[in-house]
Every structure is written in structure tokens, then in C-alpha cells.
Amino acid sequence: MVTDIGQDVKPSDRWMIVEIVDGDTVILSSGERLRLANIDAPEQEQPYYEEAKQFLTELALGKTARLEFPARRRDKYGRLLAYMFIDSVMAGEALLERGLGYLLLFKQSDYDRPQIQRLLKAQRRAMAAGVGLFSMERTPEECYLARYGRFRFHRPGCTQIGKFRPDRYRLFETRDEALYEGLTPCRRCRP
């Protein structure tokens, strides 16, 4: 896994956004693919995919971005990971505030970063306002599960869970309880 950003991309640099791939990925003028750090926008064929992509297009396409990098600067696919700012607007925060994505965490220490606190507050505002993904009607499950130390939550019958063992999983009475804590819905069972 590549962990540094190379000599061509520095945190202090500003980059033109030349293409919007989807709601959480752009192409920089350097040719690098940039994934918005800690954001999970809908994939193609999912609700609010087009809205997320369109919002990011209007916000960033053809504009100059300032990047702030988390500790891990590339994902497993080699894409840059960064918090992208267009003028004073943090793109990920703006997406979450409109309910066009979910916060995406990987470890407990993520909560300690000020950027994560901004993103979590934006997601909570979207939840309270009932906008975007948080406006969708869903049939509630009897509960939702998240493995201790992990940041995805699941429906009770999800294949990602396997055999349920109470000592390994946290239970949430509602989907919103898990989202409020910053957990992300499983991509397989889509709670």
C-alpha cells in the first residue's frame, strides 16, 4: 500500500478539480484521483447518487481546491485521501449536511480529529432536518448490530455478521442511533 503522497502533491498545494467521478471522488489537474476523506457517498444505482455527484460538480468542478491530509494519505486503490476545501467550504461537510452521504470511520481514534467532529456534526444536522438520505422511509428492523471496534452497522440477518454472539456485537434499537454515533451502513445489507 502506498502511504505517502509523493513529491508531486503536497498539503500546501492547491489543485484544480478537472472531473467529478461520483459524490466522493474527483480528478485533480495533476491527474490524481482524490477520494474525500471519511465520506461514503451513494454508489451508482443507489438513491441520491445523482444528487451527490451533481452537488460536488456545482461545488468543485473547474475550481481550485486546498487539500488537508489525514494520517493515511492513500486508500487501498491508490487514490489520494484528503479533506477538500473550495474556498472556505469543506466539501465533505457540505455533502453530509445535505444528507448526500455518510460519515466513514475506520478506528476509534478517528473521533479525536477535529475534521471528524465537523463531519459528525454535519451528519447529525442532516439527520435532524430529515434531508437527503435521512428523508427516506425505511422499514425498521427489530435491532441493528455493529461489531465492537468496527464502524459499520448491519441488519440482524446480514451475511457480514455470521453467527451472532452477543459478546462481539453492540445492539442499536434504531438505525438513527448507529448513524448518530458515526457508524456507516453496511454496503451489503443496506440497513
Image (spheres, rainbow, N blue to C red):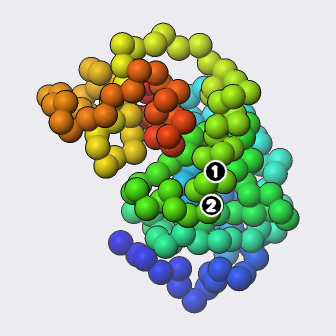
Task: Tell me the quadrant of the picture where the N terminus can be found.
Answer: bottom left
**Element on which disc 2 rests:** helix
Residue type indicated by callout 1: Leu
Front-most of residues 154 and 114: 114
Per the image, the residue denoted by label 2 is 115
Q: Can the viewer see residue 47 in this picture? A: yes
Task: Please name the residue shown 46% across and 51% down the image.
Answer: 105
Between 106 and 50, the one nearer to me in the picture: 106
Tell which of 115 and 57 is nearer to you. 115
Find residue 153 and name its label: none
- Residue 35, position in %: x, y? 57, 58
Residue 12 falls left or right of residue 184: right
Rendered residue at 27%/20% (across/down): 157
Which quadrant is home to the C terminus? top left
Viewer-closest of 168 and 31: 168
- Identity, as a three-letter code, of the amino acid under mark 2: Gln
Q: What residue sits 69% from the left and 34% below the top?
A: 126
- Which of the 4 image quadrants contains residue 156? top left
Q: In which quarter of the image is residue 77?
A: bottom left
Residue 72 placement, left or right of 47: left
Q: Do the residues labelled 2 and 1 touch (CB within 8 Å)?
A: yes
Residue ID for mark 1: 119
* Mark 2 burial class by Cα count in 10 Å: few <14, some 14-19, many 20+: some
Q: How far is the residue under mark 2 from the one under mark 1?
A: 6 Å
Residue at (43% x, 27% y) in the render: 190
